[in-house]
Amino acid sequence: MPSVHTSGRTRLQAVQMKESYRQLIVPQFPHPAEHTLPNGVPAYVIHSDYHEALRIDIVIGAGQWEQSKLLQALFTNRLLREGTARLTSGVLAEKLDYYGAWLELSVSVHHSFITLYTLSRFVRETCTLLRDMLLNPVFPQDRFEVIRMNNLQQHRVSRQRGDVMARRLLYGAVYGQEHPCGRFAEEEDFVAVTRDDLLQFYQTFYGSANSFVCLSGKVDDEALSIVAECFGEPWGCATPLPARREVEEPLSVDELEKAGGTFSPLVQSHGHLVQSSIRMGGLLMDVNSDDYYPMRVLCTILGGFFGSRLMKSIREDMGYTYGISADLLTNTGRTFFVVSSETVADKAQEVVEGIRMQMRRLQDELVPEAELTMVRNYMLGELCRNYEGAFAMADASIYLRTLGLPEDHIERVIDAIVNVSAEELRTLAQRWLLPERMQTVVVGP
C-alpha cells in the first residue's frame, strides 16, 4: 500500500508541476502585424518603443538550391553593396557609416537576405540607399575579382581545419554529392563563376514578386510609409519564376531502418591536425511533423546544454573533450540531427562509443522527472533569452516563413517543453536516435 500511495502522490505532483508551468512561467510572444506594400509584397512588422533603431529585412526566395553554379547565389548577394548605377562601393560605404547604419548580407539553402540596421531618424536616407543597392546594382568586375580572391583565400585556410573537413564529409555522405546540401565549393568553383552568372541569378530571382519584407524596432507610421515609398512599386524580375528544381531526398534514419540500410564510418587522417573532429548525424522527421517539437526536448537532454548527458559523460566523466553538442538543423524541410565534438586525437573511438551509449540509454530508460524538470526550466529560459526584443522576434518570424512553419510554431514548441512525458521521449528515441543508421565521421592526425 505505501508504494501505491507514493506513486499516486508522485503523479499528482507531476500534474501540479505542469499546471504551474502553464500558470506561472510559460512565456508569451507577440506575433508580427501583417501589412501589404502597394505592389503586393508582404510586410511583417514587430514594433518596439524600446528601440531608437529600425531593422529592415528583405528576403529573396532564392539561394543555394536555385543556383546553376556553386557560389552564384553567395556572390550575387555580396556584390549588391559593391556599387550601383549612381554610387560606387566606396561612396555607399561612406554614406552608411555617416548615418550609423549597418548592412548584413547572407544566403541560405533557399533564400537570400539583405538586412539593414539604421537609426530611426535616418530611415529615409538609409532606406533610399538600400533601394538603390537592391534595384540598381552593377556588379563591377574589379570588385568581383577582389571579393572572389578574398573568399578563395578564406576557403584555403578553413579547408585545412578538422571541423570543416568533418562537416563537409558528413553532409556529403548523408545528402549525396548531387544534393545542394551535399555539395561544397572547391578552388575550381571560385574560378568558374563569372560576373555574367551573377547578373543571370539577379535578373532571374531578385524582384518584388519573389520577396517579403520584415520591419522591426521603432516602426512608426512614418517609417512604414517610407519603406512603402522605397519598395512599394514592382521591381526586378518580371517573368514567371522557373520551377524549383527537384532533387531526390536521401532517406531518413527511420526509412533506413525499414530498408535495412546503414552507413560505413568515414575516417580521414591529416598530419597537420593535433586533435580529432567527430561528427555523427542523419536525417530525421520533416520540420512540420508532430515529432519535431518533442524531439527538440530530447535533443536538449542528450546534448543541447552544458548540463546535458553528453557533456556530463564525455566531458566530465571521461575528460575527453572541452565540449560536445547535439543539434537539430533545418537546412531544408527535413530535420538534420548532428552530434559534434573535438577530442584528444587517440580517444575518438571512445567518444563515438560514448555517444552511442547515451543514445541507447534514452531508448531503454525513462528520463527521471528531476532531469526533465531541469531541462524544461532551461529550455523555457532559453526561449525568453532568444526571443527577447524586436530584432530577435524578427529572426523568429523570418525563420518561420522561410521554412514554411505554422504561425503557432513557438506555441507548439512551448507546449512540447511543458507537456512531453518521459514515456513519449523514450518512444521518440527508439524511433529516431538510431546510431547504427547515422553517419559517423572522424577526421584527425
Image (tube, rainbow, N blue to C red):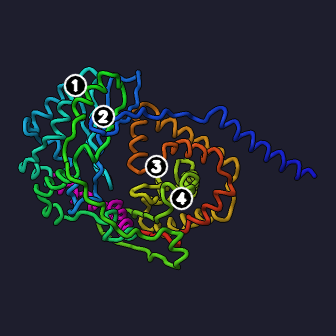
Q: Earlier in the sequence, mark 4 or mark 3?
A: 4
Check disc 2: other Cα within 10 Å, few if <14, some if 14-19, many if 20+. many
> Is 170 contained in the magenta span?
yes
How far apart are the two marked residues, 4 and 1, measured between alpha carbons?
54 Å
Q: Nearer the viewer, mark 2 or mark 3?
A: 2
Total labels drawn: 4
Residue at image coords 24%, 37%: 103
Q: Nearer the viewer, mark 4 or mark 2?
A: 2
How far apart are the two marked residues, 2 and 3, measured between alpha carbons?
23 Å
Residue at image coords 38%, 68%: 175
How far apart are the two marked residues, 4 and 2, measured between alpha carbons?
53 Å
Q: Position of residue 275 (x, y in %)?
A: 38, 62
Q: Earlier in the sequence, mark 4 or mark 1?
A: 1
Marking on residue 124? 1
Q: Secondary structure at mark 2?
A: loop
Q: Nearer the viewer, residue 394 or 160?
A: 394
Residue at image coords 26%, 57%: 158
Q: Secondary structure at mark 3?
A: loop
- Magenta residues, as a range? 150-172
> Is 317 contained in the magenta span?
no
Q: Nearer the viewer, mark 4 or mark 3?
A: 3
Q: Position of residue 344 (x, y in %)?
A: 43, 62
Quadrant hosting residue 212: top left
